[in-house]
Image: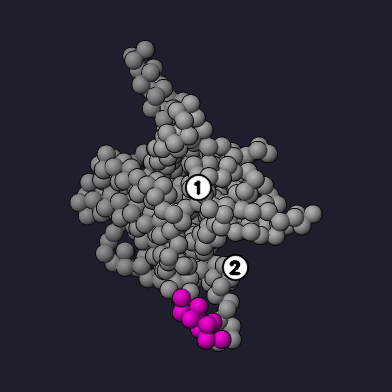
Amino acid sequence: MLYYLFELLNDMNLPGAGMFQYISFRSSLAIITSLFISMVFGKKIIRLLQKKQIGEVVRDLGLEGQMQKKGTPTMGGIIIILSIIIPVLLFARLDNTYVILMLITTIWLGLIGFLDDYIKVFKKDKKGLAGKFKILGQIGLGLIVGVTLYLSNDVVIRERAEDVKINGNIEVVDNIQGELEEEEEYQVIDVKSTKTTIPFFKNNEADYAGIFEFLGKERAQKWGWILFIIVVIFIITAVSNGANMTDGLDGLATGSSAIMGATLGILAYVSGHMIYADYLNIMFIPHTGELVIFAAAFIGATIGFLWYNSYPAQVFMGDTGSLSLGGIIAVYAIIIHKEMLIPLLCGVFLMENLSVMMQVAYFKYTKKRNGEGRRIFLMAPLHHHFQMKGMPEAKIVIRFWIVGIVLA
């Protein structure tokens, strides 16, 4: 909202008002504001949660120090959500489709997580919201994101004219001076595309529509978008659930999410900058620069929350926070066409998810075959396996952070 105020002031030639045009300046304000909200107002929210006796219900799994966490305030994800939304509303351009999608994602999954926590705490039902309703909510968000990216005219990638077969439906939108050694001019065009990025290859672009080339160009594009929407739904569901499973130790999900958010913020910045994108040989996506402001708010919110969530935690984020964090990371990666990086970037979430799937599958298989179920890990998710081996909680968390940094 302040962007438009300062744009008006800049038109009136007010000294300094032009600073708001710079993404770096607004991102700095966003991270400072989110840190302030999460650390200062976060403390007041924690006190309110304690006053309302909104405490964690702990199942006795036989883990060391586990029962000491009983009664610790939960639903602290509210702090993260407010610390993201307020700076974004203040400093980002609210007419940007990508920013709107990120705000919808944050609120949508935050409400699903809040409902789950509410049922656990106030209805005294340890199971919380039924899994099928969580999945339906995640599928609904995936449809909103996928269909919006398909229908919005603002969602395009920009390519050099010589790299694209120009027809009547594609308009030359710019004629720029290339930052090449020869300083040659070249035309660029905005293209509605289902292309994505394949990491670690020089020719690093692949097209969902390319799978259906045998159907002809028009049908291939339609089926490419259908496949893309299915992939969006799968990624949002997988990553948000992965973040939810990771949130089992103090600071684990929060710190891991901050690392992922910082990485995606850098990728969004270079993807939205024509010169850097051309130099680094990555896809240039117009208007994604505004997402850097969202990433800055995300980083500030998670680091500020980590002040209270680090071991020993004064507050837990609950599903209100974990589902939101996972969904934000998933949608952010999809928007900047870096969803193929998720298995690597979100490797900590993936390991946690896979450990549960492997444990359950192997237990069922051995029970069917031998009449007695066996386990691969001492306990799943994976962080509990290391707890059962006697490793201190803080050490497990820091080592998982290190793995996350290496993967990033």
Residue tagged 1: 168
The front one of 174 and 228 is 174
Contact check, label 2 and label 1, Cβ < 8 Å: no
- Image spot of residue 188 (x, y percent): 61, 53
Q: Which amino acid does label 2 sit on?
A: Ser
Residue range highlighted in magenta = 4-13
The residue shown at (62%, 48%) is 161
* Mark carried by residue 406: none
Query: At label 1, which amino acid type do we have?
Result: Gly
Which quarter of the figure is the N terminus placed in?
bottom left
> Within the image, what quadrant is residue 135 found in?
top left
Residue 216 in the image: above or below residue 174:
above
For image coordinates 48% across by 34% down, the residue present is: 217
The residue wearing badge 2 is 24
Residues 319 and 66: in front is: 319
Q: Where is residue 56 in the image (x, y as percent from the top left)?
A: 32, 53
Measure the alpha-carbon separation of dots 2 and 1: 38 Å
